[in-house]
Image (spheres, grey):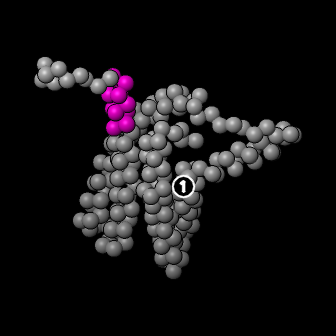
């Protein structure tokens, strides 16, 4: 009100919408990052201090709060990514090389090469490998109670959890933030 009375022009509506969309996306990314970092801190706390420690309890509470805020921002962030993809569809179209022989295998191979050039896709795939390692160890570890394999499985499980959390904290989330900031599509 005071700015309008003083004759200061208000910013255009499109600038305000862009700023609000960017704020929502970065709050979503911050809550995602915090959820994965708190999950890693919880796992490290379990190893260092035991399951009943104060560190584990606090890290678990931070993890729960961050995960809840991530879930609350996800529908809005998804809509914003869809709107960004629709509006930047014409600008972001890449030239698809025309192959002399249009065999399905060559088209799929070219698409896979293009996908694997993306840092985001590689980060998600590596995190998926760590997650699968964790599930595999949980499956095998439940059958080897009381042996030295149980200790080995617990260490490998920790490596899987921390590896996936690290990939999301240091590769996936920063790459999404960078792509949004540069106004580039995710794929």
Region rendered in magenta: 13-24
Q: Is residue 156 above or below residue 99?
A: below
Q: Position of residue 76 (x, y in %)?
A: 40, 32
Q: Quick one: 15 or 112, which is closer to the camera? A: 15
Q: Quick one: 43 or 79, which is closer to the camera? A: 79
20 within the magenta span: yes
Q: Quadrant of residue 18?
A: top left
Q: Is residue 121 above or below residue 24?
A: below
- Residue at (77, 42) in percent of width and height: 107
Q: Position of residue 8 (x, y in %)?
A: 19, 23
Quadrant location, the C terminus: top right
User: Which residue occupies the extreme front position in the image?
Assistant: 7
User: Which residue occupies the extreme right position in the image?
Assistant: 101
Q: Position of residue 138 (x, y in %)?
A: 52, 63
In this rendering, position of residue 101 left or right of residue 62 = right
Q: Quick one: 79 or 184, which is closer to the camera? A: 184
């Amino acid at each position: 009100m005071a700015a309008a009375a003083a004759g200061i022009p208000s910013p255009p509506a499109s600038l305000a919408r862009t700023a609000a969309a960017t704020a929502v996306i970065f709050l979503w990314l911050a809550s995602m990052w915090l959820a994965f970092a708190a999950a890693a801190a919880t796992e490290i706390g379990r190893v260092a201090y035991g399951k009943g420690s104060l560190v584990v309890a606090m890290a678990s509470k931070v993890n729960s709060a961050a995960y809840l805020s991530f879930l609350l921002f996800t529908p809005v962030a998804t809509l914003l990514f869809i709107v960004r993809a629709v509006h930047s569809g014409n600008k972001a179209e890449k030239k698809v090389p025309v192959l002399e022989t249009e065999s399905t295998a060559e088209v799929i191979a070219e698409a896979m090469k293009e996908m694997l050039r993306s840092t985001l896709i590689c980060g998600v795939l590596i995190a998926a490998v760590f997650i699968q390692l964790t599930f595999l160890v949980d499956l095998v570890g439940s059958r080897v109670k009381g042996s030295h394999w149980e200790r080995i499985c617990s260490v490998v499980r920790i490596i899987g959890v921390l590896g996936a959390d690290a990939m999301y904290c240091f590769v996936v989330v920063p790459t999404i933030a960078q792509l949004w900031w540069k106004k580039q599509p995710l794929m």
